[in-house]
Image (tube, grey):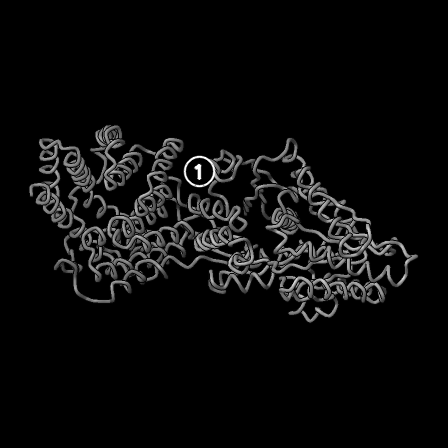
């Protein structure tokens, strides 16, 4: 198993999400041991950082470009392309930071996209200045989660919030692990010290309530000094000043001014800029008498969890995910809860009173903090435990079977009507006695292996006949006649019948696109997949299923239902059988048709270059160039068409004797439309005549009707 996790930095750089990711990666590497490889894709790791991470934790590092906004270059990263590629089972991304990278990687390579939910932007957009940034982030977040296969929410508050993005079976709640090092301190140095962490700039402070904590500290200190003027001044340990020196100096001056105005004293304040030195941060927290987490809103509040890990008495806002968790476990009484009321003065007094109560009976508060830590450790709230529970959830995740959402789903969209499209009737299976006699002579008394060989030869004969005549309806009639006889002798569930069902679905979709035909074709394709999974399958059989069945069902006949078509392709790419055995060329075919449905020039160009890298045959190169040509022509973007038309023609001339005759007709149809677009009437007429004659010869009624309509529109 391979897991790739996208993040913009290792450690605590840029904040809590990266700290969470680092601990999760280490927990996963520890929990999975040799059962899986954990890859951490990091934006520009420091020199030697990748080697250090691998040596210390066994985590492989993929260096990414900077910034992470260049999605194409990230996905084209040589490590991902060549060292990881399609072996990845799970792609992890973090919310709007890297979630889109995980979903795109899944789209390109298969696997499962898992996005972690860290922020509930819609819950506090009104609190920040105008909230416009948060509104935009909320929109982006929705898009990311809609493309994710699974959402992992950090804590109960975000888990509840994620319900609007996905059903229960696609959501999981992860609880961060407790800090295991350093250990809690048994003796606190005097004087009474208070820990407060969080960015203090005005935009973030309105959510994190850092200045509220400073005010509460000042009011409590004033009261304490009034009770005993000979005592040592209380100390405030304040982490989170700006890393910009000038801005940090301004923030420090503001803090000291606020403390003097509220307490009447110049109190000692340990002001520390935001730092990646986690060890120093945790040691100062462990040595503090009490920690303040007063957020107006916080998805989880990792600082609170760190304080609990170190058995530090905690004043915790009721508007945090950490509080919701403790409350659900019946442990909220072991912390000191404050509720932001909206009034700054009343909030500050509320917190100051709590601080005074803690100071007056500190032993009891400390004992409660130790009890809380021990209970949570007994419940295995460690990073190894969190990683283990997450992997249990992921290992139980299986994408819906292709059968459950593929053509039966399309059948219901059509409304279940038996009316046939364009007056075309569903072809009935013909006995095909003359052809079958050759294969069925002595079939019933033959040994099982001999019967399987006969079935394979029969299927091959039908496929060859279709390639020679270009008549899918006739081939389908003969094939189903044989299939009926084989089922009678061997039983309907014999695995060797899987390729026969696969070819039947392919042929039927090529000769009829009515609702009844699609329903019947789907029965063949579903049976093919079901029987393939019961047998020992080789790569060729799976590639046949991918390319000839699902590809045609989605691409050739269902382009009027693009959103469903994309869903079918994604399900095919996720299916374990296809993911494990399908070749690069087969997967490229699926990805190509997905790009066509979405009319994405960029994706088609990417695939065209990927085909050359893989050394795939020139037939695949022709089809990809042809589809790119169609997409650009649909957008009527004439400029790139001239050069591309030369490339398509060159490839067509190379493969013209080896491709299905249908594609010769389509090639001439496309070039008829292209020459109409550029105003070359003689060439347009030439390609039209070639295309219409082929359509009539091959009995391609749909193509014939389309060509006649295009020609009439052009002439008028």
Between residues 248 and 174, which one lies in front from this camera angle?
248
Residue position for label 1: 72
Q: Residue furthest right?
A: 230
Q: Secondary structure at mark 1?
A: helix
Q: Is residue 696 left or right of residue 74?
A: left
Between residues 209 and 256, which one lies in front from this camera angle?
256
Q: Is residue 77 above or below residue 147?
A: above
Q: Position of residue 301 (x, y in %)?
A: 65, 57
Q: Is residue 464 above or below residue 427?
A: above
Is residue 360 among what the camera can see? yes
Is residue 34 among what the camera can see? no
Which quarter of the picture shows residue 641? Answer: top left
Q: The C terminus lies in which quarter of the figure?
A: top left
At x 62%, y 50%, the residue is 202
Between residues 316 and 646, which one lies in front from this camera angle?
316
Badge 1 density bin: few <14, some 14–19, many ≥20, Cα 10 Å: some
At x 22%, y 57%, the residue is 480
Q: Position of residue 518 (x, y in %)?
A: 24, 58
Which quarter of the picture shows residue 668? Answer: top left
At x 59%, y 38%, the residue is 61
Q: Position of residue 133 (x, y in %)?
A: 50, 50
């Amino acid at each position: 198993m391979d897991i790739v996790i996208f993040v913009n930095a290792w450690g605590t750089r840029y904040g809590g999400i990266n700290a969470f990711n680092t601990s999760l990666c280490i927990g996963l590497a520890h929990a999975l041991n040799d059962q899986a490889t954990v890859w951490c894709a990091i934006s520009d790791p420091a020199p030697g950082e990748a080697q250090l991470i691998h040596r210390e934790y066994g985590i492989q590092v993929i260096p990414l470009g900077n910034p992470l906004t260049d999605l194409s270059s990230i996905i084209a990263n040589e490590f991902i392309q060549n060292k990881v590629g399609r072996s990845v089972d799970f792609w992890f991304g973090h919310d709007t930071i890297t979630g889109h990278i995980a979903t795109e990687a899944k789209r390109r390579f298969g696997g499962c996209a898992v996005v972690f939910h860290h922020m509930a932007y819609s819950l506090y957009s009104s609190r920040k200045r105008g909230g416009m940034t948060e509104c935009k982030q909320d929109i982006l977040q929705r898009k990311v989660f809609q493309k994710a296969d699974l959402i992992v929410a950090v804590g109960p508050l975000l888990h509840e919030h994620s319900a609007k993005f996905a059903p229960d079976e696609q959501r999981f709640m992860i609880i961060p692990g407790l800090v295991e090092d350093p250990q809690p301190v048994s003796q606190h140095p005097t004087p009474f010290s208070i820990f407060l962490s969080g960015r203090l700039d005005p935009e973030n402070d309105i959510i994190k309530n850092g200045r509220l904590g400073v005010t509460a500290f000042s009011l409590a200190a004033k009261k304490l000094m009034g009770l005993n003027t000979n005592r040592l001044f209380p100390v405030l340990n304040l982490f989170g000043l700006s890393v910009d020196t000038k801005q940090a100096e301004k923030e420090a001056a503001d803090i000291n001014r606020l403390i003097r105005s509220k307490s009447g004293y110049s109190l000692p304040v340990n002001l520390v800029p935001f730092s990646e030195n986690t060890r120093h941060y945790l040691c100062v927290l462990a040595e503090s008498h009490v920690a303040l987490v007063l957020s107006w809103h916080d998805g989880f509040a990792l600082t609170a969890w760190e304080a609990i890990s170190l058995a530090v008495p905690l004043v915790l806002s009721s508007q945090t995910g950490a509080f919701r968790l403790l409350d659900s476990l019946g442990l909220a009484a072991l912390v000191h809860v404050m509720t932001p009321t909206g009034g700054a003065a009343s909030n500050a007094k509320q917190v100051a009173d709590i601080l005074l109560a803690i100071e007056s009976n500190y032993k009891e508060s400390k004992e409660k903090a130790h009890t809380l830590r021990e209970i949570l450790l007994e419940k295995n709230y460690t990073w190894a435990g969190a990683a283990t529970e997450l992997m249990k959830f992921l290992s139980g995740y299986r994408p819906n079977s292709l059968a459950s959402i593929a053509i039966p789903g399309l059948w219901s969209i059509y409304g279940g009507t038996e009316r046939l499209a364009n007056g075309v009737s569903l072809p009935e299976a013909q006995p095909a006695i003359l052809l079958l006699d050759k294969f069925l002579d002595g079939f019933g008394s033959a040994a099982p292996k001999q019967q399987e060989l006969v079935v394979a030869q029969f299927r091959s004969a039908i496929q060859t006949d279709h390639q020679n005549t270009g008549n899918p309806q006739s081939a389908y009639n003969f094939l189903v006649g044989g299939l009926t006889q084989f089922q009678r002798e061997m039983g309907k569930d014999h695995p060797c019948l899987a390729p026969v069902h696969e070819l039947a679905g392919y042929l039927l979709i090529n000769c009829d696109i009515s609702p009844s035909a699609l329903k019947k074709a789907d029965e063949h394709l579903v049976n093919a997949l079901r029987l393939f999974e019961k047998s020992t399958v080789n790569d060729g059989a799976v590639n046949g299923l991918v390319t000839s069945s699902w590809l045609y069902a989605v691409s050739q006949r269902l382009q009027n239902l693009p959103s469903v078509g994309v869903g079918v392709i994604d399900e095919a790419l996720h299916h374990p059988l296809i993911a494990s055995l399908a070749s690069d060329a087969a997967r490229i075919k699926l990805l190509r048709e997905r790009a066509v449905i979405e009319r994405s020039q960029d994706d088609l160009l990417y695939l065209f270059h990927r085909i050359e890298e893989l050394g795939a045959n020139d037939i695949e190169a022709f089809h990809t160039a042809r589809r790119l040509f169609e997409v650009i022509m649909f957008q009527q973007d004439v400029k790139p068409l001239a050069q591309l038309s030369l490339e398509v023609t060159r490839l067509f001339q190379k493969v013209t004797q080896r491709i299905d005759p249908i594609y010769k007709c389509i090639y001439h149809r496309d070039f008829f439309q292209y020459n109409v677009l550029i105003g070359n009437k003689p060439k347009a007429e030439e390609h039209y005549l070639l295309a219409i004659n082929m359509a009539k010869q091959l009995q391609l009624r749909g193509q014939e009707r389309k060509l006649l309509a295009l020609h009439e529109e052009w002439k008028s």
